[in-house]
Image (tube, rainbow, N blue to C red):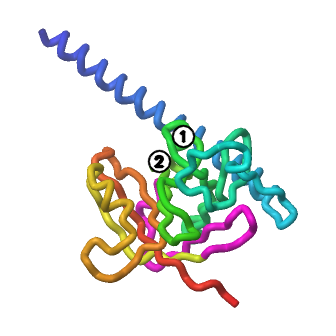
Amino acid sequence: MRNVLIALGVLCILGAAGLTGYNILDSRRAEDASNRIVTALSEQMNPETELYDMQQDGVDDLSHPDMPVMELDGYAYIGLLIIPSLDLKLPVMDRWDEERLRISSCVYEGSYLSNDLVICAHNYIGMFSDVRWIDIGADVYILTVDGDYLHYIVTNLENLAATQVQDMTQNEHNSGISNKWDMTLFTCNTGGQTRRAIRCERLPAET
């Protein structure tokens, strides 16, 4: 019996080590893919770039068709998410699903044009891992594919249960204070039972 328990313990340890190794490799793969996409988008994002119009191309299932996008490798991107304090620059796909989330941060809901943008990403290293610990007051930027810099500032941090979908996408302060979130970034906390929501307010464009 003792030998059986030892064998089971060893198998559990090996299984945990294998899962940890897979997660590390998947995180590195996602970081490499993200960096490659950032470079490719940055090279193409200039005033002369012809933007990819998915509506004209017959794609009519967008939840936010108002934002211009750029196509790369069969995916459409609204631009780059930039957080200087974390030395982070990520591509942002125009929509989300499990396949897209393994490559990039994604629009979950809303639009920067209507100031209700929600962006999600895995908590991989090099993606939203460090975003969970961002400070209130940190600057966040969206560089759109047509070259506009949109400036946001982090004003609140929340932990929400995975079931609190409405609270995640709600762009009004949950406490009842008349405070509007112009953008939310969110990812899973360790363990996956809760979500970290980073609430941002948009600053007026500099003149």
Q: Residues within 10 Å of mark 1 (few under 14, many from 20)?
A: many
Query: Can residue 32 be spotted in the picture?
Result: no
Is 52 a magenta residue?
A: no
- How much space separates mark 2 and mark 1, taking CA atoms? 7 Å
176 left or right, relative to 98: left
Q: Which mark is residue 102?
A: 1
Magenta-drawn segment: 129-150
Residue 142 among magenta residues: yes
Q: Position of residue 4 (x, y in %)?
A: 19, 10
Name the residue nearer the viewer: 111 or 125: 111
Residue 139 position (above or below residue 88):
below
Q: Is residue 207 left or right of residue 48?
A: left
Residue drawn where x is 67% and y is 67% of the image: 143
Earlier residue among tags 2 and 1: 1
What's the residue type where badge 2 is placed? His
Q: Residue at x 67, y 48 (%)?
A: 76
Q: Amino acid at mark 1?
A: Arg
Based on the displayed image, in which of its 4 quarters is residue 15 positioned?
top left
Q: Mark 2 near mark 1, Cβ–Cβ under 8 Å?
A: yes
Look at 24% across and 21% down and name the residue there: 9
Q: Secondary structure at mark 2?
A: loop
Check disc 2 and report the residue beneath it. Answer: 122
Between 44 and 89, which is closer to the camera in this rendering?
Answer: 44
Tell me the quarter of the image containing the N terminus: top left
In the image, farthest residue toward the bottom: 207
